[in-house]
Structures are given as structure tokens and as C-alpha cells.
Image (spheres, helix red, strand yellow):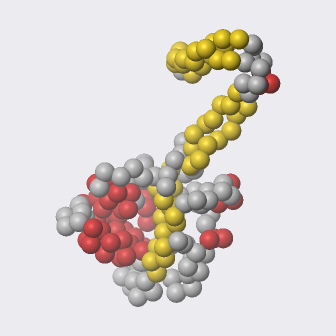
């Protein structure tokens, strides 16, 4: 939550995704921007076989909540079997995994999307000594009390005044959760 808010302050588009149940500590935070799946982060691709058709015009419009795509052939005719549907590449170029010791421990996102990390840089941010260092960049600090402490250091290094009330509250919540209220 803190990292997503900080990236937004920097003008970056980001999506925090947690598919497991949200930790109880997050109940006091605004988690409305935390996604539960990767829905909406891939293009939906409609492909047409043009082997026997030459296209003259293509247009689209939205009517009653439906997207209508109109294809006007110059010659030939399209048939339903000429159309196929698939998904394009993911609409992000970097993945940051926080507090996960091994790539196989990444939750159902990786199971449901086995090509998720193909061609992407992955930043592995963790404080556990047993981290498997699976990222293209591994920032592991076993002396830190939590990933929230590590994020705080990163944010302070990026920009003075980065940590506002929302980000500070999220970081404090993370530190308190990881340290069992500083005990």
C-alpha cells in the first residue's frame, strides 16, 4: 500500500496485487486500490484470418455497454471461423515482489499466469535470511525489521518529503505487524 502510494506521488502507474487474504493489520488502511487479481492488466486480442479477404474499413463504437467492431471487406467475406481471441502481453514492465522468500511461494498469481515474469525485470525485496535471491534485482536486508522499514529507506533516498500521512501510516502498520507491535 505504501509503495503504491509512493509510486503514484512520483507519477508512476502501478497496481498492488494481493490474491491471498489480506493481513489483519491492513484493516486500518485504505486497501481499495489493492487488486485481488491481474484482471485488466493484459490486452485482449481479436485476430482475423485475412487469407481470403481484403479489408477496406475498420471502425468501432460502444452502444449500450457493448463494443461493436465493424469490418468492411473490400473483397471476399469473413466467416466466424476466421476470428480467434487471445491475450496480449502484460501491461507492465517491472514486477516488485515484497516479502516472499522464494519464487515458488508467490501465491496463485504465478500458478494462474505461468508466463507472468517472462521478459520482465523482477525486484525481490525482502528481509528474511532464507530468501532464495530469485529476482533480477535482489534487495535483501536481514538486519531490517520488516519490508516496511526497507521501503521507508528507499522512499527517503528517492525524495525528501515523500512520506506523507497515508504512506507513513501504511509503513508504520507494516512495521508494527512485522514486529508484533514492537515486542
User: Along the horizontal axis of the image, is 95 left or right of 20?
Assistant: left
Which residue is depicted at the point 42% across and 78% down? 146
Which is more toward the observer, 45 or 164?
A: 45
- Against 6, is 135 above or below? below
Which residue is depicted at the point 36% across and 82% down? 182
- Against 67, is 157 above or below? below
User: Along the horizontal axis of the image, is 135 left or right of 86?
Assistant: left
User: Along the horizontal axis of the image, is 92 left or right of 78?
Assistant: left
Which is more toward the observer, 137 or 72?
A: 72
Q: Quadrant of the C terminus?
A: bottom left
Quarter of the rendering containing residue 139: bottom left
Which is more toward the observer, 181 or 108?
A: 108
Whether residue 108 is visible: no
Whether residue 30 is visible: yes
- Against 161, is 86 above or below? above
Residue 175 point in image, percent of width and height: 37, 75
- Against 37, is 152 above or below? below
Residue 16 point in image, percent of width and height: 46, 56
Residue 142 point in image, percent of width and height: 45, 86
User: Along the horizontal axis of the image, is 12 left or right of 110?
Assistant: left
Residue 149 point in image, percent of width and height: 35, 76
Q: Residue furthest left?
A: 161
Q: Residue furthest right?
A: 81
Which residue is depicted at the point 46% across and 52% down? 15
Which residue is depicted at the point 53% across and 71% down? 136
Which is more toward the observer, 91 or 4?
A: 91
Amino acid at each position: 500500500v505504501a509503495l503504491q502510494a509512493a509510486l503514484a506521488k512520483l507519477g508512476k502507474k502501478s497496481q498492488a496485487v494481493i490474491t491471498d487474504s489480506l493481513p489483519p493489520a491492513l484493516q486500518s488502511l485504505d486497501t481499495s486500490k489493492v487488486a485481488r487479481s491481474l484482471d485488466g492488466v493484459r490486452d485482449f486480442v481479436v485476430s482475423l484470418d485475412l487469407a481470403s479477404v481484403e479489408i477496406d474499413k475498420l471502425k468501432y463504437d460502444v452502444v449500450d455497454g457493448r463494443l461493436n467492431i465493424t469490418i468492411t471487406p473490400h473483397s471476399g467475406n469473413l466467416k466466424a471461423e476466421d476470428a480467434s481471441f487471445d491475450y496480449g502481453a502484460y501491461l507492465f514492465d517491472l514486477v516488485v515482489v515484497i516479502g516472499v522468500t522464494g519464487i515458488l511461494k508467490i501465491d496463485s498469481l504465478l500458478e494462474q499466469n505461468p508466463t507472468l515474469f517472462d521478459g520482465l525485470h523482477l525486484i525481490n525485496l525482502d528481509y528474511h535470511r532464507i530468501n532464495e535471491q530469485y529476482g533480477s534485482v535482489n534487495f535483501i536486508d536481514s538486519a531490517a525489521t520488516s519490508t516496511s522499514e526497507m521501503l521507508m529507506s528507499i522512499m527517503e533516498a528517492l525524495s525528501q518529503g515523500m512520506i506523507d500521512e497515508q504512506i507513513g501510516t501504511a509503513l508504520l502498520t507494516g512495521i508494527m505487524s512485522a514486529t508484533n507491535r514492537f515486542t
